[in-house]
Image: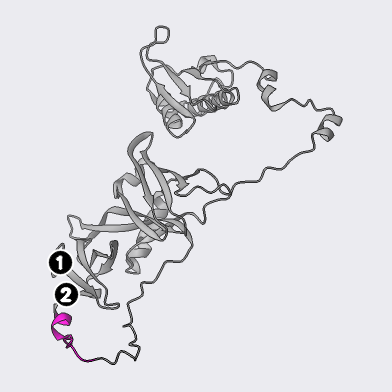
């Protein structure tokens, strides 16, 4: 190929200089200009040697210092529109046994087209299995490579869990903003076909348009509620007026009245998770320090679903599935972060 990795190049349309990072396929490669990497077609760049050779040499001359000399025009890099935070998918092509172009994998970038420097934590799951944990800061109007998504893994239920926060705290905006993106195979296939057909480098998926503001809580007239017959409690005494909350739940199907007789395994699992989530929410309301969930051993599917749920919750301090004197390996103990 004409260019090799780390070759110095010049973008013919703008005159910007950079270097070659790697080839994507026979027609396209990734270059770096001013520490920003992006894909281009090979015919859009050239070696800088010819321009350097033919450029006019500067010769010293006497200049009238009373006359202002205009600065040379600089190549102005076009800034992206302030249209939110995006994921960019770059299809990477390969050849099959018939020498036809196929998509090997997608190179995924995070695009921060906002005016905010953002901190993000990213957990990547395939099904219920966590594969990757990332934590980085991405500057305003910047782009960052995240990971490669193999084409065949689109059928493994990939899920991207983002937790965004502002690099500089702002009391008028939320402390954390969680975004979950699940790539849908049919949608990704369609957008990939359109990109290759139009000979474009990538396609984008929007995560959010702007970092959200805090919701201003409305103040209610408690006197009107009291007059209407509602019981009003002081905030610090709410939990004392709630029914006692259990710290243990057994999710075996035969222990749950919600499970119908002829339910199939998928229906049973769905009911078990709903019962668990309700139990979990009640534990938070009561500010419990610890709960125990009995899920049994079986195929391990219920345990995996519960553990995947717990990994996504910031209020969970830790959890463990260990040998318990009463339940063996069929139970998970959960501890919560306590609010001071």
Residue extending farthest top: 325
**In this picture, residue 42 sits left or right of residue 204:** left
Q: Quadrant of the N terminus?
A: bottom left
**Which mark sits nearer the N-terminus, 2 or 1?**
1
Residues in magenta? 50-62
- Name the mark on residue 7: 1
Residue 336 vs residue 24, the one in the foreground: 336
Residue 108 on image: x %, y %: 33, 53
Q: Residue at x 44, y 26 (%)?
A: 317
Which residue is at 29% across, 78% downward?
13
- Residue 136 in percent (x, y) is at 36, 47
Q: Is residue 124 visible?
A: yes
Q: Are marks 2 and 1 in contact (CB under 8 Å)?
A: yes
The kind of secondary structure element at disc 1 is loop
Spatial CA distance of label 2 from label 1 is: 8 Å
Q: Is residue 96 above or below residue 338?
A: below
> SS of the residue at dot 2?
loop
Question: Residue 246 or 62: which is nearer the viewer?
Answer: 62
Q: Residue furthest front?
A: 66
């Amino acid at each position: 190929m004409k260019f090799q990795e780390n070759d110095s190049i010049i973008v013919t349309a703008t005159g910007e200089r950079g270097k070659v990072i790697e080839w994507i396929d026979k027609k396209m490669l990734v270059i770096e200009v001013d520490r920003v990497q992006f894909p281009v077609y090979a015919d859009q760049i050239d070696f800088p040697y010819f321009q350097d050779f033919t450029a006019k040499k500067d010769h010293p001359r006497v200049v009238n210092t009373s006359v202002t000399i205009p600065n040379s025009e600089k190549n102005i890099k076009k800034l992206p529109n302030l249209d939110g935070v995006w994921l960019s998918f770059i299809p990477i092509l390969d050849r099959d046994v018939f020498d036809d172009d196929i998509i090997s994998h997608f190179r995924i970038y995070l695009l921060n087209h906002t005016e905010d420097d953002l901190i993000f934590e990213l957990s990547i799951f395939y099904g219920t299995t966590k594969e990757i944990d990332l934590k980085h800061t991405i500057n305003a109007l910047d782009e960052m490579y995240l990971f490669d998504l193999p084409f065949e893994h689109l059928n493994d239920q990939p899920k991207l869990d983002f937790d965004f926060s502002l690099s500089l705290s702002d009391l008028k905006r939320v402390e954390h903003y969680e975004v979950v993106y699940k790539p849908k195979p049919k949608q990704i296939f369609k957008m990939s076909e359109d990109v290759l057909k139009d000979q474009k480098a990538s396609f984008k998926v929007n995560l959010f348009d702007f970092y959200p503001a805090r919701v201003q809580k409305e103040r209610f007239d408690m006197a009107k509620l009291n007059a209407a017959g509602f019981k009003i409690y002081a905030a610090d005494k709410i939990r004392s007026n709630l029914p006692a909350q259990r710290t243990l739940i057994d999710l075996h199907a035969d222990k749950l009245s919600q499970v119908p007789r002829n339910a199939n395994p998928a229906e049973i699992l769905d009911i078990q998770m709903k019962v668990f989530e309700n139990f979990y929410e009640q534990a938070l309301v009561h500010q419990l320090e610890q709960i125990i969930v009995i899920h049994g051993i079986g195929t391990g599917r219920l345990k995996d679903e519960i553990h995947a749920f717990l990994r996504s919750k910031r209020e969970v301090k830790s959890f463990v599935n260990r040998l318990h004197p009463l339940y063996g390996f069929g139970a998970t103990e959960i501890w919560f972060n306590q609010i001071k």
